[in-house]
Image: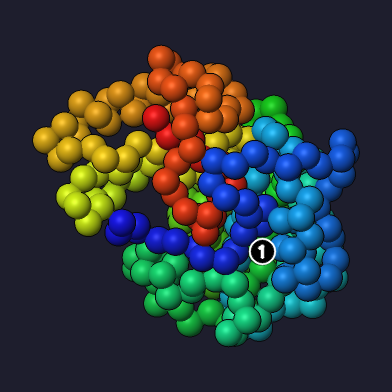
Amino acid sequence: MKHLLILATLLPFATACGGPAKTRKPGASPPTGGTLSAQLAQAAHDGPAHGDAMITLAVFLAGPPPEADAARKAAMSGVRAAHLSTEGLVVTPAPIDDALPLDLGALATAAGPQGAALAAARGVIFVRYAGRPAPDGAHLRAAGEAALAVAPADALVVDLSTRATWAPAALRAALGTPAWRADQVVPEATRADDGTVTFATRGMAKFGLPDLEQTGVAPEAARAAFERFTEVWRALRVHGPAAPGDTVAGALLRPCARGAEAYDLECVAF
């Protein structure tokens, strides 16, 4: 299948798509120290509780990354200044080198006109949130505020779930607005080698929900199929956390075909 982008190894909480989420101890938060690889390994071992929200923003820098402690202090100060909670946030700077678990070339291609600047970046600061979805999307804004607090004017901020890319000034203008919240989940359509179409969402994990997928759609049936896909997608938002075997809007959910290398943790199909 020809996907728009696969983030191959940056898996804050990686498990096979559609598999059961692990249970984290009540009140436990992601690790706050150590190398990026150590944090990813620990997070994959612990896993999120079922229904936990997951967000990862990447701040790409024209220069090398700052010291870890300085980046964390700046990010947390920015969140507190906005009167938001820092619980569940992890800030990890890293140089862009061969050890970075990220397909930067593919991400730059998806960034369009901003891709050249992104491909030339020398450092990155990952801002990750794992925890319960907060009322009114406060956890979404907290992650955005943390990213802005460590992003110089020439940086680029990328949502690794939806691939949306912003200059800091653009993100600041959009942060918390109705349009910005509406763009937290995006649908995509890809064509498989056999000519059939796959519909999928990206970004549902930010609300503690699985992404939705529908595969094997004949091109001539795509319009009607997408209307049904949208109906189930909207119902899933109301239904809340779901797993294969559940029924949503009359659709029996099953494990999806999206591979285990996909970025977001959970996915269901119908």
**x, y (%) of residue 53?**
66, 40
Query: How busy is the neighbourhood of tag 1: few (under 14 within 10 Å), some, or many (20 plus)?
Result: many
**x, y (%) of residue 32?**
84, 60
Q: Is residue 198 above or below residue 163?
A: above
> Pointer 1: what residue?
126
- Residue 59 seen in this snapshot: yes
Q: Is residue 153 above or below residue 89?
A: below
Q: Is residue 190 above or below residue 224?
A: below
Q: In the depicted view, which residue is nearer to us: 149 or 45?
A: 45
As helix, strand or loop, the secondary structure at mark 1 comes to strand
**x, y (%) of residue 118?**
47, 74
206 sits to left or right of 83: left
Residue at screen point 61% across, 77% down: 100
150 sits to left or right of 224: right
Residue at screen point 73% across, 48% down: 47
- Residue 78 seen in this snapshot: no
Quadrant of residue 64 in the image?
bottom right
Three-letter code, disc 1: Phe
Residue at screen point 66% across, 64% down: 126
Q: In the depicted view, which residue is nearer to us: 75 or 198?
A: 198
Residue at screen point 63% across, 54% down: 14
Q: Quadrant of the N terminus?
A: bottom left
